[in-house]
Amino acid sequence: MNTKKPEKRRIKRKLLDKYRLVILNEHTFEERLSIKLTRLNVFVLASLTAIILIAGTTMLIAFTTLREYIPGYSSASLKKRATELNYKTDSLLQVITLNDRYYASIKKVLQGEVSSLDFSRDSIIQAVKLEASEVNLKPTAEDSILRQKVDKEDKYNLFESATSASNFILFPPVNGTISETYNVKNKHFAVDVVVAKGTPIKATADGIVIFAEWTATTGYVVIIEHSYGLISVYKHNSALTKTQGDLVKAGEVIATAGNTGELSTGPHLHFELWNDGYPINPTNFIDFK
């Protein structure tokens, strides 16, 4: 116990012992500056100086633009650009996905790859009005009542009822003899019309060309998108007069007939009509003779 007290007194004395820091002129030994110090004052002053330096450096790094020059820190403008690029990338991915689906459907139209499971009989009847031989034409009691009601309305609404009669009139792309008819069972969703080589092929309705390229199996192909979900396809052409993105009018020449492609058996036009993804018989709406 007695030995510890003298040690504490020594430490206290060392900390509180006064010293004088004197700055003299080297040549004249004139005293320029004199400062009284203790070890405790020096320790406190050094600690405060270190704390102030650390706090000042932290403030500069956290609240000024100097932090951008420190490795690992990114600027606010860089973060903003990165966020904008992230949004643009997400939007581009969505557009690419939609385009892939669109081109996949076009590919099915070109290759005729339509599975019988992709559509039902009822949906075809509703969408494209199949041939009368495949539809039950016997009217039901409800249908007879509806017919009578419509007939009465038509007597007093002649002009209103007459406006929807010509919605599906299409222009014949060519005139000629049909060598192969539309056949769902054989998956021939088109009509083949025999024509001379070089015969002008015309657009069946107003629309926009969404495909105009060469394919190995069907030669030069043109696909036109019309109103109301209608798409027309023209295959085995010898040359094309329109390119993708062109606007065409009904009856405007879009190609010339030929015998191109591996699946062609002679100069003819392979003509298809599709409505909302379903094939329809072109002869129901077009007279090719």
Image (spheres, rainbow, N blue to C red):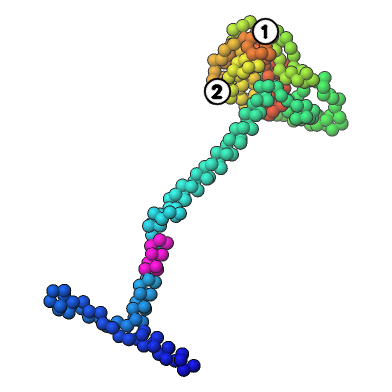
| Main secondary structure type of the part rendered in magenta | helix
Residue type marked 2: Gln
Whether residue 59 is in magenta: the answer is yes
Judge whether residue 181 can be spotted in this image.
yes
Please report the bounds of the magenta region as a residue range.
53-62
Above or below — where is 155 with respect to 170?
below
Q: Residue at x 80, y 31 (%)?
A: 146
35 left or right of 128 in image: left
Return the residue found at the far left. Answer: 28
Residue type marked 1: Gly
Above or below — where is 43 with respect to 68?
below
Q: Position of residue 55 (x, y in %)?
A: 40, 68
Q: Residue at x 68, y 13 (%)?
A: 263
Q: Position of residue 113 (x, y in %)?
A: 71, 24
Whether residue 219 is in magenta: the answer is no
Which residue was labeled with disc 1?
266
Q: Residue at x 69, y 16 (%)?
A: 286
Q: Nearer the viewer, residue 18 or 192?
A: 18
Judge whether residue 171 can be spotted in this image.
no
Q: Where is residue 163 in the image (x, y as percent from the top left)?
A: 66, 26
Return the residue found at the far top. Answer: 196
> Can you tell which quarter of the image residue 156 is in?
top right
Which residue was labeled with disc 2?
244
Could you tell me how far apart the alpha carbons at marks 2 and 1 are, in whole angstroms?
Answer: 26 Å
